């Protein structure tokens, strides 16, 4: 309550005898000696300025109410989700209407009522992201609006999430939820647009969870990502079946020369140990797609690929597939072991299969799923010490 000395969202009544209260026991969820009361929600009146239509990865397009800012529960609020068409219609929302708003559970802004009910908001016939046709669905008497274009950017959130992930371009501060908001606002239409978000400072700093500091950090992270490696870029494109390990193998094959990487043919790819026919076919098809090529060309205008560092390490693990599990002691972590293996021509995968040659595990007697699978398939399990001896001598211990 506003007139309390300390902020609170309610009060709890309980017995003043602790021993008696404890003797009452509890239900599966609550103690029987107490009862909680919540303060009545703080409600403010304001003016509805517009309805923003926000498209999501499922194709659902939700109405968002934008209104004149009001102070609620100690924060300034200027927007609230209306959730679906049924709620919007029941409130008879119209631009310029006087609405009352509150914070559900003192957190989530909601519209409690519309005092003027002009009902002049029109449901869009096209998607705000792609411009494609929309469809109104009515399920269980609840109306919702959908974009029916399968190629809508809002439905391609996963490709953007991969692009900025740690093993790809490594852009910190761009969560999946944030990317979804940027796309919904029309600030990002393709992958390369991420490098221009500094042009939208006002729009981004007004987003929930963002301020001057977080925007500055995001801008710095984007600029750091401009300098990257061929393998990171190749992985970031999301080519079917091409994970980070395969991306590194392909880039090593072509000495990090991007022109050779994107123009690699089926025969060249299948010469690489670990790259099968299906992977090679997917790879070639990806780079022959005109739309994909436009996206890649736009990205290349924004990034600088680091020159390939000559690998002088003896390729003692060439053509050998490893899986690493459990803790390590001689290396910083499993990622360092993976890097050592890949520098020497080997490949590290996440699961044990018939193609796995060695499982590195310091506890060969553990009942882990990887150990069981290795024993089932006859895959040799070696310790970190055995691996280190192999690394130093160039020969696998007996």
Image: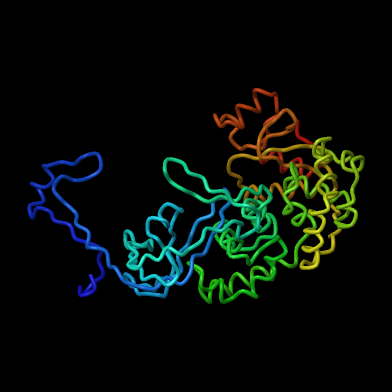
Q: Does residue 335 appear left or right of residue 229 in this picture?
A: left
Q: Is residue 283 above or below residue 169?
A: above
State the quadrant of the N terminus.
bottom left
Q: Does residue 339 appear left or right of residue 32 in this picture?
A: right
Residue 146: image location, x then y, percent: 56, 50
**Residue at image coords 62%, 48%:** 148
**Residue at image coords 13%, 45%:** 22
Residue 390: image location, x then y, percent: 76, 40
**Residue at image coords 70%, 66%:** 193
Give 351 or 194, whichever is nearer the viewer: 194
Give 43 or 271, whichever is nearer the viewer: 43
Q: Is residue 371 above or below residue 299?
A: above
State the quadrant of the C terminus.
top right
Give 382 or 86, whichever is nearer the viewer: 86
Residue 230: image location, x then y, percent: 80, 57
Q: Is residue 222 above or below residue 38?
A: below
């Amino acid at each position: 309550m506003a007139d309390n000395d300390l902020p609170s969202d309610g009060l709890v009544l309980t017995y003043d005898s602790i021993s008696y209260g404890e003797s009452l026991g509890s239900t599966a969820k609550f103690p029987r000696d107490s009862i909680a009361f919540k303060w009545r929600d703080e409600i403010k009146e304001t003016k509805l300025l517009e309805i923003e239509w926000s498209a999501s990865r499922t194709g659902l397009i939700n109405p968002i109410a934008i209104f004149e800012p009001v102070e609620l529960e100690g924060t300034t609020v200027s927007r609230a989700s209306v959730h679906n068409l049924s709620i919007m219609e029941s409130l008879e929302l119209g631009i310029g209407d006087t609405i009352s708003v509150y914070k559900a559970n003192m957190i989530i802004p909601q519209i409690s009522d519309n005092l003027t009910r002009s009902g002049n908001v029109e449901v869009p016939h096209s998607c705000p992201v792609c411009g494609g046709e929309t469809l109104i669905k009515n399920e269980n008497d609840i109306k919702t609006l959908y974009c029916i274009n399968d190629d809508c950017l809002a439905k391609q959130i996963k490709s953007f999430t991969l692009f900025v992930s740690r093993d790809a371009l490594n852009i910190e501060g761009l969560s999946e939820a944030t990317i979804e908001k940027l796309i919904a606002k029309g600030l990002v239409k393709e992958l390369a647009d991420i490098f221009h978000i500094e042009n939208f400072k006002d729009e981004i700093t007004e987003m929930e969870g963002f301020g001057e500091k977080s925007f500055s950090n995001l801008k710095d992270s984007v600029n750091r990502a401009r300098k990257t490696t061929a393998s990171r870029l190749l992985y970031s494109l999301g080519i079917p079946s091409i994970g980070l390990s395969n991306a590194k193998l392909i880039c090593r094959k072509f000495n990090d020369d991007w022109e050779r990487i994107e123009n690699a043919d089926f025969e060249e790819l299948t010469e690489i140990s670990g790259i099968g026919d299906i992977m090679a076919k997917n790879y070639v098809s990806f780079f022959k797609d005109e739309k994909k090529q436009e996206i890649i060309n736009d990205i290349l205008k924004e990034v600088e690929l680091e020159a390939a560092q000559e690998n002088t390490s003896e390729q003692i693990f060439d053509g050998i597939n490893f899986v690493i599990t459990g803790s390590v002691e001689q290396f910083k972590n499993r990622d360092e072991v993976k890097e050592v293996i890949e520098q020497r021509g080997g490949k590290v995968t996440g699961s044990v299969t018939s193609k796995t040659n060695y499982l590195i595990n310091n506890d060969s007697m553990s009942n882990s799923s990887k150990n069981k699978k290795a024993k089932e398939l006859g895959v040799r399990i070696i310790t970190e010490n055995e691996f280190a001896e192999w690394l130093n001598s160039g020969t696998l211990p007996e």
